[in-house]
């Protein structure tokens, strides 16, 4: 896992990193709807099934990352008039959509209701993040 992906993974799990890369758990109240963090946590499986939980977390992370990347590319697309850059952005957005729906399809096989909750959290996060980015 690359460094930036590890930091994003830690952020989405409610953790922060220090310079040595050690993880420090922050307090996270997942019931607080004002919390800007996406509620990423295992949605199926027991404690004995840690491989399945890890896979679920990776799928949720893939959905979150590809969704946010797509939105930022879409915002950039609206402001760019260079034909070559626009073509690159269209291709990148297509790759993001493909990655999102592959992860979504796999995640829906575990628990469609939990997937619905996760997508609602993701939409809330995108709205909060992107409205702040556009206001800047």
Image (spheres, helix red, strand yellow):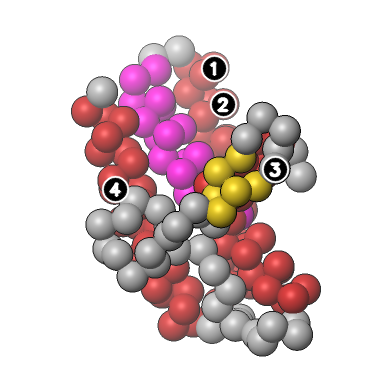
Q: CA distance from mark 2 to mark 4?
A: 25 Å
Q: Which residue is mark 1?
A: 84
Q: Which residues are magenta?
A: 62-80
For marks 4 and 1, give the one nearer the viewer. Answer: 4
- Given contact means CB atoms under 8 Å apart, are the residues at marks 1 and 2 in contact? yes
78 lies above or below 61: above
Q: Dot 2: few (<14), some (14–19), or many (≥20) neighbours within 10 Å?
A: few
Q: Main secondary structure of the magenta part?
A: helix
Q: Which residue is mark 2?
A: 88
For marks 3 and 4, give the one nearer the viewer. Answer: 3
Q: Which residue is mark 4?
A: 127
89 lies above or below 28: above
131 lies above or below 108: above
| Residue 72 coordinates in the image, percent (x, y) | 43, 34
Q: CA distance from mark 4 to mark 1?
A: 29 Å
For marks 3 and 2, give the one nearer the viewer. Answer: 3
For marks 2 and 4, give the one nearer the viewer. Answer: 4
Q: Dot 1: few (<14), some (14–19), or many (≥20) neighbours within 10 Å?
A: few
Sooner in the amino-acid sequence: mark 3 or mark 1: 3
- Given contact means CB atoms under 8 Å apart, are the residues at marks 3 and 1 in contact? no
Q: Is residue 62 visible?
A: yes
| Residue 21 coordinates in the image, percent (x, y) | 70, 38
| SS type, badge 2 | helix
Q: Left or right: 52 with respect to 113?
A: right
Q: Which mark is residue 22?
A: 3
Q: Compare residues 76 and 17 and report the one nearer the observer.
A: 17
Sooner in the amino-acid sequence: mark 3 or mark 4: 3
43 is within the stretch colored magenta: no
């Amino acid at each position: 896992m690359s460094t930036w992906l590890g930091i994003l993974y830690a952020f989405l799990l409610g953790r922060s990193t220090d310079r040595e890369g050690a993880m420090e758990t922050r307090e996270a109240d997942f019931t607080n709807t004002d919390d800007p963090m996406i509620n990423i946590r295992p949605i199926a499986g027991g404690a004995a099934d840690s491989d399945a939980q890890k896979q679920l977390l990776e799928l949720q992370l893939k959905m979150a990352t590809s969704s946010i990347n797509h939105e930022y590319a879409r915002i950039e697309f609206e402001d760019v008039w260079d034909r070559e850059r626009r073509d690159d952005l269209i291709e990148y957005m297509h790759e993001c959509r493909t990655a999102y729906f592959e992860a979504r399809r796999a995640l829906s096989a575990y628990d469609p209701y939990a997937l619905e909750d996760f997508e609602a959290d993701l939409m809330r996060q995108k709205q909060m993040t992107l409205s702040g980015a556009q206001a800047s």
